[in-house]
Amino acid sequence: MLFNSFSFLIFFPVVIAVFFIIPRKTRYIWLLAASYYFYMCWNVKYVLLLLGTTAVTYLGALFIERAKERTVLKKLITALSAIAVLSLLGYFKYANFAIDSLNRVFLELRGVTPFKASDVLLPMGISFYVFQALGYVIDVYREDIKAEKNPLRYALFISFFPQLVAGPIERAGKLMGQLNRIHEVDLWDADRIQRGALTMLYGFFMKMVIADRASVFVNTVFDPEMYSTYGGFMYAVAAVLFSIQIYCDFAGYTYIAIGSAGVMGVEIMDNFHTPYLALNIRDFWDRWHISLSKWFRDYLYFPLGGSRKGRVRKYINIFVVFLLSGLWHGAAWHFVLWGALHGIMRIAGEATGAVRQKIYSALRFKTETFATRLWQRACTFVMVTLAWIVFRAESIGQAVSIIKGMLTTYNPWVLFDGSLYTCGLDEKDFHVLIYAILFMILIDVLLYGKKKLTEAFAAQNLWFKWLVFIAGICFIAVFGVYGPDFQASQFIYFQF
Amino acid sequence: MFDKIKKVFRIIILFLIFLCILWMALVRMNRVFSVKAAGAVQERFCDMKKDSCDIVFVGNSHQFCSIDPMLLYEEFGIESFMLATSAQTVPMSYYAVMEAVEMQHPETVIFEVSYCANDFRTVTNEMSHYFFDGMPLGHIKKAAIEDLIEDEPFYFYIPFGMYHTRWKELGESDFGDYDVNERGGVFFTEVTPNVEIPVIDISEKEPMPEEMEKYMDMMAEYCRENNVNLILYTAPFNTLYDGDENLDEDLKRRQRIFNYVGEYADRNGLEYHNLFYEIDALGIDNETDWLDRQHFNANGQRKFTEYMANRGYIRK
């Protein structure tokens, strides 16, 4: 079940209504049942993977805790648990990638493709819940948290539906505690419910009005069959719109998750914090998919030695983390390249930092001015957007073609002669997209200034809050991208 | 404790008021965005006072272009409603009869049967909206959608999901009322001259498509069970398929099926009138009375309605 589906519009109010009606002590059981139903709406069979991951990590954590001072045993159990769940991820997400890569090598060398790809379906959310479960096991191993004894409570932590399929990847220390105290949540805290609902509404706006509208243009220009007919500024517009699309898609989904959990009194971590206002690549990764960045930092970068083993080792560690981050995002070489590009940009930014500072000092260049920051933000956005082309393209070859076409074809007139309106979005749709993006930027600027928008909203008079909700719902209902496309020609009066 | 109860009560009341306002806003939006031609008839039917019409007409565009329920009332004192909609197939007409009986329980239902010769349950998904939009939510709508709609049935319950993209083309008329009168009637003033009705006088019969006959049986049975008189008729037309090179053969086939409908009516104790055979008596002027080669315009509709009433085919 997707958040932006009509099923969810029925599912969510039912879950909330029952959640508040049933005895408080049974709330977690209800949420567990709802979460599994939520997952099974996508695929009934694959719920076994969720169950398997839950069972393995639940038992693993209990055994780790019982092993107490026996360090080797603890390590062994942790490693076995990790191997078990990562094997699931590896098989379902990366097996075909590995087979395809090997076949390509054999094809080049011997002209044959000896391996047959399996027809497994990528289980929804597997990358998220596997990492969340793995983080839990490692936290128990590190004795940061106690192992959860109640299997149902633990199953809820892994499957909690707001963040099950697209994160944020929560830490047990934060989420499990809240879920264990869910019976204490006050039904009649209107402010909390309003804050959650507003966050959800904004998430729907980002997803349905901006992301899904931008995707129409992006998909047209990036279409593998058609992309070669475009060039120059059309690629640039598509790349910028893809940057907007992926942000609004992912952050929108996260806001819906945060808001829906918030309505139930559960506070989920923020996963995005104005990423396109970042001053450099490092800053970007502190603001983009924060839960994944922190996961890699705590469970991979630090264990690899972090920055404690010298500068070269630090850069290697950073590069490894970004390579794996790329691979986590998708099983294809262009995702790996995307991760590598970010790794290189991140390392280059850090390695040249001191030199740049010296140059600025020598030139008496003020770095704390608005103009400088704007320039830094623009440069960061351009770098991130170029990398997104690699991410979005169907292959590395297509990405190279598009970047080459962008740099070698000079056709700025396409911005003015109506060509923009021939890529799936007509002029009116394009205008709606632009206005919606401007609104999103305004919100981001306010959030960047640490404005507590939901709190400020909750403090307003009731009539204003109602106005915002009703206008917001109506706006999304009209301008959201969903449903079968209406075509007047299909309604020719009098046919038959 | 009292304060807590007061707080809870206040929140519930406020929430209900909020839902009411939101609902009203969405209903208004739905009205503005919907295709005015679709949904109008059904909504008008819902607006009618209960048990206020003696006759309900069902069928497709041939029906509503042929009969003017307003004229029936003004000239003949007959209380009726036109529940026919564009592309209303025989199965849809069956559900329209159920709806008519449940909401108005008329004495008579008059069904224009030209679609009996067409073996389809729906014409297109989009055209089906003419029948379903505006139909009140209830067991009949649910049964009809489950029975007839295969693709995206959700949008037949909430058609706004499909119409919302019309924001680009909204005009003044979208904010106005439906152009269907309170008895569901419509008329068209455009004229197509030189339309000739070929009277194909053949005596052969050809059974109507099996599934259509099944729904006809269900309709007849339903009317019998509910003590409603079911009258069948065929309005004349030139062709259903402009430019069809097999036009003559198609018309012959339809006439054979209409002859079969006559036999079917006799078998089931129903009244049936094939107006193809009364074309001369109708007094239709082929230069002035046709909207196109299938449908009467306002002139033709008036003549046809008066003829049907004067002949007693439509009666109290």
Image (tube, rainbow, N blue to C red):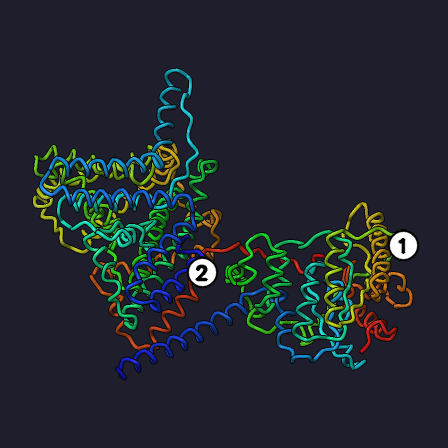
Amino acid type for the residue under numbered disc 1: Ile
Number of numbered markers = 2
In the rendered image, residue A171, in percent from the top left (x then y), is placed at 21, 51
Q: CA distance from mark 2 to mark 1?
A: 53 Å
Q: Is residue B120 left or right of residue A489?
A: right
Assess whether mark 1 and mark 2 are in contact (beta carbons under 8 angstroms).
no
Q: To which quarter of the image does residue A142 belong? A: top left
In depth, the one of A378 and B284 nearer the eye is B284
* Outermost residue, front side: A66
Q: Secondary structure at mark 2?
A: helix
Q: Can marks 2 and 1 be said to lie on one chain?
A: no
Q: Is residue B235 left or right of residue A401?
A: right
Q: Which of the chains bears the disc numbered 2? A: A
* Outermost residue, top side: A110
Instruction: From the image, tell me which residue sits under label 1.
Output: B200
Which label sits on residue A479? 2
Amino acid type for the residue under numbered disc 2: Phe
How crowded pointer 2 is (Cα within 10 Å; few <14, some 14-19, many 20+) is rated as: many
In the rendered image, residue B278, in percent from the top left (x then y), is placed at 89, 64
Q: Which of the chains bears the disc numbered 1? A: B
In the rendered image, residue B61, in percent from the top left (x then y), is placed at 73, 63
Of the 4 image quadrants, the one containing the C terminus of chain A is: bottom right
In depth, the one of B35 and B258 nearer the eye is B258
In depth, the one of B166 and A162 nearer the eye is A162
Q: Is residue B71 left or right of residue A332?
A: right
In depth, the one of A348 and A6 nearer the eye is A6
Q: To which quarter of the image does residue B20 belong? A: bottom left
Which label sits on residue B190? none
In the rendered image, residue A279, in percent from the top left (x then y), is placed at 20, 49
Which residue occupies 23% across, 38% down? A82
Q: To which quarter of the image does residue B77 belong? A: bottom right
Q: Secondary structure at mark 1?
A: loop
